[in-house]
Image (cartoon, helix red, strand yellow):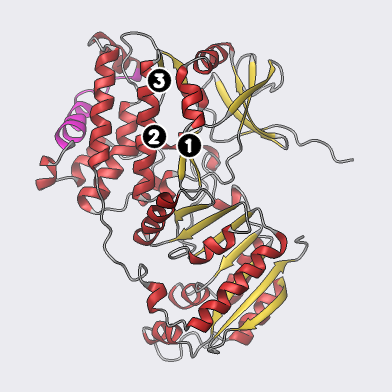
Amino acid sequence: MATAQAPRADPGSFRDPDSRVFVSREGVFRALSERGMQDWHALRSAGLWDDLVGRGKLIPTEAVEDGGAAPGLLTGDCALVLRHERIPFVSYPYEWTFGMLKDAALLQLEVLERALAEGLMVKDSSPYNVQWRGAAPVFADIGSFERLREGEPWIGYRQFCMLFLYPLMLQAYRGVDFQPLLRGSLDGIEPATAAALLRGRDRLRRGVPTHVAMHARLDRRYAQDTGRAVKGRLRSAGFSTELVRANVGRLRRLVERLRWSPDASGWTGYRDANGYSEADAAAKADFVASAAGRRRPGIVWDLGCNDGRYARIAADHGRIVVALDSDHATVERLYRDLREAGDRRILPLVGDVCDPSPDLGWANAERGSMLHRVRPELTLCLALVHHLSISGNVPLAEIASWLARLGGRVVIEFPEREDPMVQRLLAAKRDGAHADYDARHFEACLGACMRITRRERLPEGSRVLYEAEAVGAR
């Protein structure tokens, strides 16, 4: 008889001494201290609870037992344990598009405004508190709520600026992709950095003088102050609840006005320009549908998802599809389409297979790489291998080995050497480069580490589809 999985503390949930998330085979839980339990009861009895949970904006949560169930997770005794709805795939803001970060910011502000109206406060303002059901954001950090103390400033304002507002401003005003900046610092973009990047005419844009330039000046002036001193000075300034509410309202209006219109990239029209005939496209769609439908996979990764056509096919058979592409503009368009359709099956993310999100934060475990979150049961690797091999210079044997390490099953498209897109990529290389780029060589590499269960050549003849599974996969 298998033993129950021991509770495991979530490595990204350690900063709040009154609330700690842990995971076991039975689900996702939260241990609360005595003070945390009192804050939970205040939240649960507030009118916002049923409304926000009912509209899908707050994670469904229930109390399951009293103290003692999660020993060692808090510095003191555990007074109460909560059970949360499990999010199928946890993602991070440095993997989101502009529209996703903006919608997450507006959700954060909506939750805060509702909390203030009912005598509550949200301790922090981190996008890591927001997760996604497909294209719908949900506020997941129930431990962030506490009872409001009159005259207390909004301590989360600085965090909101660094992790929400500045990244959105840089994308909207300067066209600077924020993902590398947020991946480079989990605390976000410092006011001085934002001020240095938003220069010239940008200094006159809406919100920059108040939330960027003035913030940077205050940072320089009080650089030596401790956090306690800053909090005390803000409190002595006479912050009323109405003043905090007004500041939150101004930020909400500012974020609502921020716009980014992504330019067309080489990938936004890729499907129309990639040379697929109608017969090839139909055969490829049928192959994906067959692979996804045979075993009803729980988690599907679509690597190089482009406009999400095949992610949608897989989503008809799976619980959730993580649709990943390195082109921000393309994923932003996909997110807008999914949001408009109210699709909760597909999670679109910005990510480069050759430069994936690493393990980050405290002990290199606070924010895990994709492979350390949830592994896929089915991976779609369509129109990608030739880019990895020729543009990325990744040997075919290493591509096959990496796909095998993902576990589960994979659907792979291999465009042969005479394929027009392959010829275009090779034209940029020296003569004789990538001599080993060959279907037979790739098939041998794939067969050395996976079991090939199906092989089909597309009607036009220059592309081959494979379905394979890792040894031991069920």
Identity of the residue drawn at 31% across and 29% down: 158
Question: How far apart, in angstroms, are the residues tagged by discs 2 and 3?
Answer: 12 Å
Disc sitting over residue 115 in the figure: 3
| Location of residue 270 (image quadrant) | bottom left
For the record, the magenta segment spans 208-227
**Does residue 225 appear in this view?**
yes
Q: Earlier in the sequence, mark 2 or mark 3?
A: 2
Q: Earlier in the sequence, mark 2 or mark 1?
A: 2
Query: What element does badge 1 sit on?
Result: strand
Q: Horizontal and vertical percent for residue 418?
A: 49, 91
Identity of the residue drawn at 56% across and 72% down: 285
Please indicate whether residue 208 sits to the left or right of residue 168 in the image: left
Q: In which quarter of the image is the N terminus?
A: top right
Query: What element does badge 2 sit on?
Result: helix
- Magenta-span inclusion, residue 196: no
Is the residue under label 1 in contact with that under label 2 (CB below 8 Å)? Answer: yes
Question: How far apart, in angstroms, are the residues tagged by discs 2 and 1?
Answer: 8 Å
- Residue closer to the observer: 378 or 212: 378
Q: Horizontal and vertical percent for residue 31?
A: 62, 22
Disc sitting over residue 138 in the figure: 1
Is the residue under label 3 in contact with that under label 2 (CB below 8 Å)? Answer: no
Name the chief secondary structure element in magenta.
helix
Q: What residue type is labelled 2?
A: Leu
Please indicate whether residue 282 sits to the left or right of residue 147 in the image: right
- Magenta-span inclusion, residue 226: yes
Vertical order, 87 against 32 (above or below): below
Q: What residue type is labelled 3?
A: Ala
Direction right: furthest residue = 1
Question: How far apart, in angstroms, are the residues tagged by discs 1 and 3?
Answer: 15 Å
